[in-house]
Amino acid sequence: MGRTKNAEQAAAAPRPERVLFDVTRTALHGGNTGVQRVVREMARNGGAALRKLGAIELVPVVWTGARYVRHRGPLSEHPHPWVALLQAVQRRRRLRRAGGDRAAAAEPIASETAEWMPDWMERMIGLARLGRASVKVGPNDRLILADAPWNSRTLLDHAESTPASVAVLLHDLLPLQVPETCEAGVPGRFRRWLDRVLPLADTAVTVSEATGRAVRDHALELELPGLRVASFRPGSDVKPGGHASDALDVSRIRPNLPPCFVGDPTVLCVGTLEPRKDHATLLDAFEAYWSRGGEARLLIAGRIGWNVDDLLRRLDEHPRRGRRLLVFHDLDDHELAYAYRLATAVVCPSIAEGFGLPIVEALRQGSRVIATDIPAHREAGGGLATYFPARDPEALARLLSCLETLPEPGAGDLAETPDWSQSAEAFFAAALGLERSER
């Protein structure tokens, strides 16, 4: 804990000349969950945000296992070719071990390859990047660990010894708060990373005040009273009250998606299939609603995560699959925007969240939102969403029965909701300890 700082030291740190923005996890593994969406938007809007905050250069960087290299161009939703190859190898191995059960074989791949990368694999991928421009970290830099790099020991070794000041973006503390929803071993690995990264950082930035409170409590447990914790609000670039045809190229939308919104109401659920998202309660609620004559459809949009064998089988074998129950595992941002705009309502049944990005995205589209009554959801939705108790399918079924009478947000209600450029400005101001009034 040699890098532990107090508040006075952090406040006295000079304004950095460069911000080195670590995007390693997203650059290598791709993905389109909330973490990657935030990282991509901060990288995309960060240059302009830092110019407003002062003449500070933004340098997106990727850790190769031995050094940082500059990342150029937009961050893709698709994995780096080396990672894709390793995923394919692991998938074949898992398929053999699972005796041909594709659901059981695929489920851990999404998690193990994305969330755990041993040093030899990290260095192998680094070898493919040796032609990239190397970035030497200096004392006038600010290194922001903005992604989810909590399984890379060599990256933490470097961050601990770097001459730059360090800030960390924490998207949630869920492996500690709801460990029962995680894979075996994840809570322990996450705690070891958190207990090491907080002492070497002078600032921790969180995506919500709810997560900020949890970080402050954990910092006190680690006896780090001088750690500065600040929060910002993730945004959305969707115009409030937008219509399905506004700025959307319908030719880029797969042909089987538009029919999902014709005729009867459609309720959309966006999120990775994993225990914490509680799709099981969602299905229970809809089955109760359908048994009473309800006609709304349920459209689930989310990649396959972990520990959802039973859920996948339930979805695959459901008698209403293809009629009232619709499932997509690979909608892109353009298709998600289309789905948000045409959905009668968006439902968020999670038992725990770091923030609640689908709530903001849905509200910006003018959609009704139904969400579990948890602190992060309340923070994201405020008085514009309708809430029900977590793990209570009957309460959700009752709301579905009066779906079209639930309140809808108007464009005026969302005038203060930040877009991504405003969100990036708030994030970098928090990470650098600057006042936004300095613009």
Image: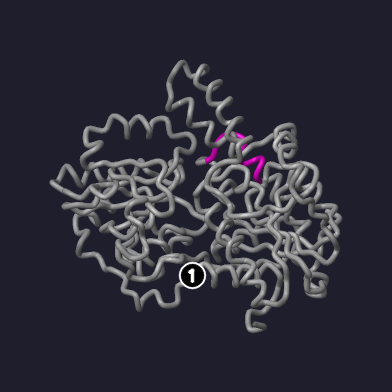
Q: Decide: is 354 above or below 175.
A: below
State the residue at coordinates (37%, 50%).
Answer: 252
Residue extent of the magenta highlight:
182-190
Q: Residues within 10 Å of mark 1 (few under 14, many from 20)?
A: some
The residue most toward the left is 293
Q: Quadrant of residue 368?
A: bottom left
| Image position of 388 (left or right of 224) | left
Q: In the image, residue 369 lies at what x, y percent?
A: 33, 61
Q: In the image, residue 314 lies at what x, y percent?
A: 32, 32
State the residue at coordinates (45%, 77%).
Answer: 416
Q: Quadrant of residue 337?
A: bottom left
State the residue at coordinates (22%, 42%).
Answer: 324
Q: Nearer the viewer, residue 200 or 109?
A: 109
Evaluate whether residue 219 shows in this view: no
Can residue 351 be found in the magenta stretch? no
| Image position of 219 (left or right of 239) | right
Q: Decide: is 312 above or below 377.
A: above
Q: In the image, residue 2 lies at what x, y percent?
A: 86, 55
| Image position of 27 (left or right of 180) | right
Quadrant position of the C terminus in the picture: bottom right
Evaluate whether residue 355 shows in this view: yes
Can residue 186 be found in the magenta stretch? yes
Q: Nearer the viewer, residue 411 or 171?
A: 411
The residue where tag 1 is placed is 419
Element carrying mark 1: loop
What colour scheme governs how the chains and residues are painted in the rendered image of this protein?
A: one colour
